[in-house]
Amino acid sequence: MLKSYKLNYHYGITPPKENGFAIKDVFLNAEPGYITCLLGKNAAGKTTLLSLLYGMLRPKSGKVSWDGKEVNYKNLAAYHREVAYFGEAWCASGLTVNKNVEMLSTLYPTFDRKLFDSLITLAQAESTLDKYYIELSTGEKAKVEIAFLLARKPKLLIMDEPLANIDPVFKVDILELLQKGVADNGTGVLISTHLIDEISDMVDYIYVLDNGEIKKHGSRFELLGDGDGNLREVLNDNN
Amino acid sequence: MSERKIMKNFLHYMQKEHKYHFKWLLFWVCGVIILLLNGGVSNNNAEKATDIHFIVSGILLAMGSIVYFRKYTELAPTTRIKGADSDPRTVEILMFTELSGIIRSHGFDVGAYFGLLIEKFMVVQGISIAAVLIAGAFKVIEMSNVFFYGGMILIIPLVIWSWEMDIMNFARTHKTGAGYAFILMVWYFIETIVAIIVLAYSFISFIILISGLVYSNALLKGVDMQAVVKYTYDDWATIWVIILAVILTIFFADVNQLIIRIQWTKTKRVIVAGIILAIAALIIVQGISCKKNNIALSENSISVKHDSSEKTYKFDEIGAYNIYYKDSELKMNVTFSDGKNEEIFDDSTETDGWDERYHSDFGYASDLVDYLLGKGVKGTIDMNGFSNNTWERDSMDKAYLEHIVTVLEN
């Protein structure tokens, strides 16, 4: 399980005055096998929080732990083998998709090429394999990246706005890939978004982030009731 | 599976993909060769020519280390992608994709990876140190230089690697910011300047070396360290080499980048190839026709060589001389009995035997003045050039100068 304890972060060297923290006193949990949503408006601090959780930023105070062990620079590589991240540059733009997969799969002993190929087929992205990564459209890149990340069989997949700038046709494929990954391999997903309606049916647990603080959290049923609730209302309820 | 084993798998992949990448070996071998050749003459740091070789060999070793690690940290292909011509953004991304740009989101252990690379490189270092030891054993280089050169071979790559690893660690764990961008900026700036000077110099020096041309006789022959000899030589070949090397490096420093950026059509390929061949021919012709001027001073004679003519004068054949001080160096203009005139201390380098016997140019001049006085030849000294800083030279030089002044002014 991924846990954060009273995470605090600010940009710059000196601590800001009271309202200047990008992330303030955040407690957050994400488990394998569940889809956890980090909900928030633009500039709420979602990307910063996910970067802290993944280890790309060092918290000013507080800590992140994975399976009970604190995440630090000594165990970062091992941590990143079990926890994947969607949203950062992950491959060489100048190589083909196949070449990238061949190269990067050497870093993951659990990488399953057959699973990757089946996910690509599911996403109808077979034509991308021999193309150079830079030649792919945004939607194709997202599909390839998610297929690669799921084929690594991580225990947790952190995703920063995976559906942003994706057209509706691709969105369906991407969501299908995610659900298959969770169902087949027990991969957990921590997904940030401000497009709440598209994933409301999938999520198990929700954290609402506003101005760097967790304002509300709970299971989907706690926050939305028996399915008639509206996540937009949950978000606006913070104000 | 251990981190080391996982990174080893990755390393094997990179090795397979870059198996024809040998540029680093060219730099390294040139660096070691120049290091060994440089050790064949005195390592007195007061001599300009020795400094140039010494510094260049150090820079070559550094470049070899840098390029070696680039081999295992660069991901961009070396050929253009068809269909990507029209998009300059595509080209830029192709050429600058490096491992440090993508490892943030992967389970990549920087320490383990660099550890493996260092272990592999130690084979090369070991062979180089063995070459230095053998050269020392056969007196191609002075034994005192063996430890120093061995130290250079060990330490220079370590300094370079630590810097590279710091950059990769920074990329691995921090977002880009002003500090990181500045580090990259300084690094690329230094790398570009060093690449221009070093690659060109090593390439041209190698060509001239292969052509059988040398800057001084001591570079090719084993030097008897006990001989009391001081060599001077024409510096023009070095200047020509550096000038032409800079021009060549504009084409060779980063051929891939050049190919992509100038949109390498067939016509342009022919033109550029022609220019490169012409410059190469010019260098070789220049080297062959380079005037090889050389003066060798010994305990009782002065040998003068101009192009293919060589003549050895005994001290008895010196008709007149003038001693003066210019550009912080002692100068001695000697006129021989056949009317030929030479600056015998210009651009020189000396053996250990010379240092032991004369200490410096002042010592040699003092002994020569005494000898010529005994033969009835009295020269002149121009005191105008001897400024205060002469008085700050060591006490032996000061004593020699006072003796010369005493002899010539009485």
Image: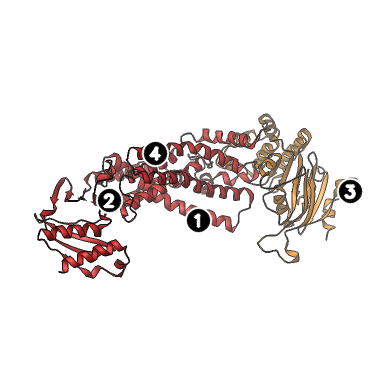
Chain colours: A orange, B red
Tag shown at residue B186: 1
* Residue at image mark 4: B133
Q: Are marks 1 and 2 in contact (CB under 8 Å)?
A: no
User: Would you say B216 lies left or right of B408 here?
Assistant: right
- Residues at marks 1 and 4, common chain? yes
Residue most extreme to the top: A114
Q: Nearer the viewer, mark 1 or mark 4?
A: 4
Separation of disc 2 and disc 4 at Cα?
23 Å
Separation of disc 1 and disc 4 at Cα?
36 Å
Q: Residue at x 30, y 70 (%)?
A: B388
**SS state under label 1:** helix
Q: Residue at x 29, y 50 (%)?
A: B238
Kind of residue indicated by mark 4: Leu
Kind of residue indicated by mark 2: Glu
Kind of residue indicated by mark 1: Val
Q: Mark 4, chain letter?
A: B
Tag shown at residue B350: 2
Tag shown at residue A222: 3
Earlier along the polypeptide chain: callout 1 or callout 2? Answer: 1
Q: Residues within 10 Å of mark 1 (few under 14, many from 20)?
A: few
Q: Mark 2, chain letter?
A: B
Tag shown at residue A20: none
User: What quarter of the picture does the N terminus of chain B occupy?
Assistant: top right
Q: Are marks 4 and 3 in contact (CB under 8 Å)?
A: no
**SS state under label 2:** strand
